[in-house]
Image: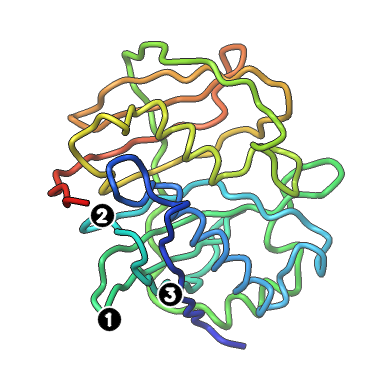
Amino acid sequence: MADLLSREYEVNYGHIDNRGIAKPSFLWLVMQDAATVHAESLHLAQDELNILWVLSRMKAHLTRPLRPYERIRCETWCPGIRGASWYRCFAFFADEQQIGDAQSMWVTLDPVSHRILRPSSFPAAESYLHTARGELFEPLPKLSCDTVRPHHIHTVQYSDLDVNNHVNNVRIVELISDALDLQRQPGFVSSLQVNYTAETAFGEQLALLCGTVDGARYVRGETDGKAHFEALATLSPFEMQEA
């Protein structure tokens, strides 16, 4: 079994925002696809094990924004398991130069009850550990903000849902981007951590709230006062290119 998956993706105009750079969700789309393909190659697919893979926490860094029709190579591998979490790393390259990286934590759920199934429940976890490479990173931290203000309310619709019948993790990054008002920001998202704390179903009213933590932008999505996801984003300057 391959301990490393390498896969190439193209940034097309469906991924580009009004400022001419890739939306933050593009990176999440790439990572979701690469993680799924690698899990299948390791015989850890949802259907094969009768489980649901759910992203718990993800943190990504980019050294620069991504442009239309760039080809991005994504490498992904598994550094190991800790507690109930399966850990996964990513590295991103353009023209063979590394331009970013990411760390993620995933959990497996029972498809009916949606309770967490620990990796020790699966003989396949042993194979996962045999393909582990690199160091196991420290758990991604919890996020919080003492002062937040309401930004907008989003009603969950059909276009938000994925095969697990909840709001997809990529779509949540798009909602976070809306709350960051990226359409009028002078910077690109150079660092973004998202913690997914509860599933969000069709018809739910998601309130998006924003704040600032040590110069970084904080976003929380909640329903009836219960947090469903939290994010912390750092924006860095970039030069606008003429059309």
Residue at point 21% right, 58% down? Answer: 63
Instruction: Residue type at mark 2: give it.
Output: Pro
**Residue on which the image places disc 2:** 65
Spatial CA span between label 3 and label 2: 18 Å
Residue at point 75% right, 73% down? Answer: 123
Q: Image check: 126 left or right of 72? A: right
Q: Image check: 211 left or right of 42? A: left
Secondary structure of residue under mark 3: strand
Q: Image check: 36 left or right of 59? A: right
- The label nearer to you, 3 versus 2, is 2
- Mark 2: few, some, or many residues within 10 Å (few <14, many ≥20)? some
**Residue on which the image places disc 1:** 96
Residue at point 49% right, 47% down? Answer: 57
Q: In the rendered image of this protein, does residue 16 appear above or below residue 69?
A: above
Residue at point 55% right, 20% down? Answer: 222
> Residue furthest toward the right?
112
Instruction: Residue type at mark 1: give it.
Output: Glu
Mark carried by residue 75: 3
Quadrant where the N terminus sits is bottom right
